[in-house]
Amino acid sequence: MNANRLKKLLLGSLVLISSMEVSAQLSVPFKSRFEKHLKGDMAMIANTIVNRADYSNGPNDAYYNHTNQAKLNDEFFMDYIDVDDDEATFSSSSAELYAENPSSKKIIFAGLYWSATYLFNEGEQKGSEKYIPVDPARENFTNILIKFPGKEKYTAIAGQLLHDGIQDRHSKDMAPYAVFADVTSQLQALTNPFGVYTVANIKATLGTLSGGSAAGWTLFVVYEDPSLSEKYISLNDGFATLNAQPIDFSYFGFHTPASGNVNVKLAFGALEGDNNLIGDQILLGTKKGGNFQPITDGKRKPNNFFNSSITLDGHYCMNRYPDSKNTLGYDSCVFTVSNPNNSIISNNADETSIRLLSTGDQCFLFFTGMVVDSDNTTKAEEKLGLTQIASKNEYKLTGLKQVLKFVPANIDLLSENNNKSTSSFNRFCKDQVIESGKTAEIQMLKISGAEPAYYLVTGIFKTDENTNQYIKFLNTKGLENIVFTNPLNNYRYVAILKTTNQEEAVAKQASKLDGVFKDCIQIVAVNKNVTQLYADASWNIKRKDTALADQTDKVKLQFISLPNEPKGYYLIANVFAMTENTGNFMNQLKKKGLSPKCLINHQNNFQYVSLIRVVTEEEAVALVKSQLNGTYTEKLWVLSVNSANESITDNDH
């Protein structure tokens, strides 16, 4: 262990927390980390890695004050916990993974997370709201050490960065980060994975920091046990700043039993949830019913869920060293949701949603998990999951009739060595219609001022001469030609079809333009980001009930909270990311005698163009089916704005 640091006292009044923006900040979209049906369950251990240091206590001394009168982490000088008596480590803490009948349990997944506020190595407060660095260095924080049960030496772990807030304008004063490492193979190799784990060398800001210093680690474990009931387990990670704009996480890949009690567990990992700052909530419900209810686990109040504690089923986890009840800004929990008479999640349910928000306490969420009874006797719908491919700006959308892959447009490959064929174009698109439609690749390309659409591209060229020769070739086949330029490399793209309908683009690619074009075809989505591509994929969702699928495909319904807009159901004609495109589209609608309105989602700055607002869902659906009483011929869908009826109360006294 390093020599004890000089203990310092934080003097002065309570540091004021800076005001938050009203829109939630989803800095890193949450993606599926693990998802499976199995007979088993989930377990968790965690601990903090920094603690208060004052005249009476060192950082290794547990902090048990978890009352409303307890000081916050920005009222203390914070120092590293270091429990291992090892000079090679500067920070370390321990926790015990315990299970009854461990011999019957088989580790299926183990994910280690660590997170901290880390603007610099050490800071101090100057004045009421000014913090300056004492040690301005900021070092690598993605490599740590872990000591597994029964082992004497540490194992080095290199993690995958989920988020670094140093460049995020919403949190740069605290610079929170989150890192993940898959340690499944290491746990599976242990003779007994149940026992004491010690995690070391996690970096955080010491001293004082705006909002306070907080740091810790969490190990989430999924195991099989044939003696347990069948469950659906889904674990997800990303990074989000919780505030007054709700964030919803939806789950689809399960089917609850037809009778009996439905048991549900939730799990979370978060940073900077202060004990005596209220307003942070978790609500559970369904998109269909809309009956979102605030939830708690016994140690967490309905309007102060993230409260600087580590809990299991409503009890403090005490098999830790140190075993602080107040972890001063680090939260981890797994708990069983109270579901009386299956009032929140019912029998035969196949979807649920978690809603998170905070009207007072700023929290950084990096992990969510759900475990629910799932008999799987009726084949559950596959989860419509958008997953970012590791280390790439590529996304995969599953849970569909056909898997879709969204990738940035290739800027390197050309078809320049021919006049009349597109054989070398296969180097560009690789003939994406693979194995009878298992996967369709859609390449994303931004072109300023161009209309958002899907193009079936059959050739790309560097010169006008070769482009014109290829157009002549298409003319001999009686094919349309649409030419546009990729601004990344000034290459000319030649397409034989342009459509605003994703389903049509995928179908035409798969059918080789109804058998007319035999060579390679690549779908290129111009001015459509991942979120818009995801929304356009509603036609593709698998459904157990074909009639329901037909109805749902015709009338798409999405939910959103927009604090500055009237409650109701809006008929949406289009969504844009660029104001210029929104204005052009609205001008076209006005020329047709329509009265469009623009709704702005400040979470992502997407602009929804609405044609009308009505009071009931039934009226909205009827108008979509009638194409706005015959006045609009293009695709419409329904956006339900501010339809949730939950309220926030202050009972944290």
Image: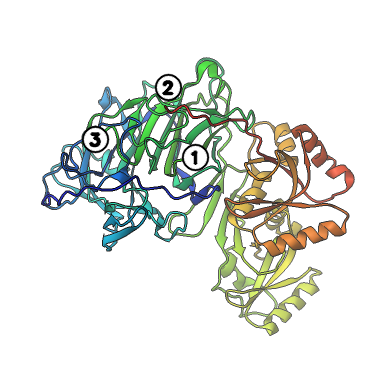
Is residue 95 shown above or below 5?
A: above
For the residue carrying disc 1, how many other residues have a C-alpha within 10 Å: few (<14), some (14-19), or many (20+)? Answer: many
Q: Which of the two residues, 74 or 225, is positioned nearer the viewer here?
A: 74
Q: CA distance from mark 2 to mark 3?
A: 38 Å
Q: Residues within 10 Å of mark 2 (few under 14, many from 20)?
A: few
Where residue 210 sits: x, y (%)?
36, 52
Q: Nearer the viewer, mark 2 or mark 3?
A: 3
Label 3 packing within 10 angstroms: few (<14), some (14-19), many (20+): some
Q: Does residue 109 show up?
A: no
Above or below residue 508? Residue 426 is below
Secondary structure at badge 2 equals loop
Of residues 566 and 536, which is closer to you in this image? 566
Amino acid type at mark 1 = Ser
Foreground: disc 1 or disc 2: 1
**In the rendered image, which residue does mark 2 sit on?**
229
What amino acid type is highlighted by mark number 3? Answer: Tyr
> What amino acid is found at the position of numbered circle 2 in the picture?
Ser
The mark tally for this picture is: 3
Q: What is the number of the mark on residue 358?
A: 1
* Disc 1 secondary structure class: strand
Task: Name the residue: 64% across, 58% down.
Answer: 577
Residue 291 lies in quadrant: top right
Residue appearing at x 56%, y 18% in the figure: 258
Dividing the image into 4 quarters, which one contains the C terminus? top left
User: Badge 3 is on which residue?
Assistant: 63
> N-terminal of the two: label 1 or label 2?
2
Gap in Å between the C-alphas at discs 1 and 2?
35 Å
